Image (tube, rainbow, N blue to C red):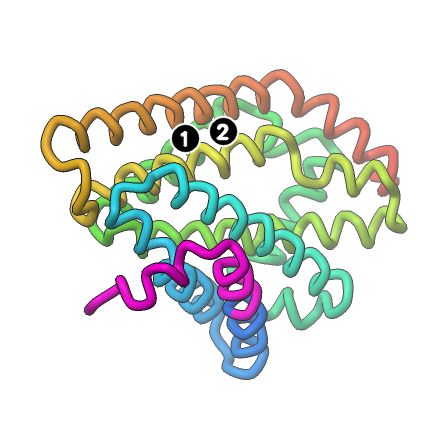
Amino acid sequence: MNLDFAAERHRSPGFAALWMAVSILLSHALEFIVPGVWLLPVVAGGSFWLLFAHPLRRGEFARAIRLALSWAAMMVAVQVTLTLLWPELMEANILRASIYRDEMFHWIGTGQGPEGDISLFLPIHLRHLAVFCVLGVASGGLLALMIGAALLGYMNFYVGSLIAASGFSPVAFLLGWQVWAAVRVTGFIIAGTALGAVLTSRNGQGAGKKRKILSWLAVALALVVADILLKWALAGFYQQALNGVIGG
């Protein structure tokens, strides 16, 4: 399959923004029509990969990462908004939506659960990272994006549910997406981009390609470690602050 069609168009920020916006909205519309919780991450991740793969195959890692971060930000905006507008519909169509929301609300209300216990959340984080990286290498980033779309889905549903439960408190808007979660998503995106290029990048072959991949992986690893440390240090503060706005 030739992914280099309309190469100059792919480089246009306007075209990229339009592609991402339309594909995200269409993937959610399709999900609401066709039952099944895996359809959304498959369509959303797959349609974005068609855009993402172009700079990735050319060895333009920084541009691929910028695109992926923009896509993730759009997913957050769209899914949080849809959760506020149609919570039941989103709950029925987002993988692990109610499970994750209930787990987080229980933690906010009681302080108990994986979110605030490093012995519980660390194995989960490492397992997600391992699966994400293996799939990213094997599929040129495609399956990693689909997994990433699934993880974003239930996180965004929780954030929208939190904002609604708080009565649209500014605290919920500010703290719903925890700082460590944003760091983790950034780290995953960088890792997925670097590893996705292992089998797909055409430019920067040999030692040059290896150095670029290793340098980006070092950044990703630093962000993953920062995620763990920030969560360990700040989870208690977030739990108490959010408990105050949703009344336990």
Mark 1 is surrounded, within 10 Å at the Cα level, by few (under 14), some (14 to 19) or many (20 or more) other residues, namely few
Question: Disc number at residue 120?
Answer: 2
Regarding residue 140, the answer to whether it shows in the image is yes
Indicate whether 156 appears above or below 39. above
**Residue 63, percent from left and from top:** 41, 43
Horizontal side of 71 relative to 197 (left or right) equals right
Per the model, the C-alpha gap separating discs 1 and 2 is 6 Å
Residue beneath the point at 70% across and 22% down? 236
Residue 7 part of the magenta segment:
yes
Disc 1 element: helix
Amino acid type at mark 1: Pro
The answer to whether marks 1 and 2 mark residues whose Cβ atoms lie closer than 8 Å is yes
Mark 2 is surrounded, within 10 Å at the Cα level, by few (under 14), some (14 to 19) or many (20 or more) other residues, namely few
Looking at the rendered image, the quarter that the C terminus falls into is top right
Per the rendered image, the range of residues in magenta is: 1-22
**Residue 132, percent from left and from top:** 34, 43
Magenta segment, principal secondary structure? helix
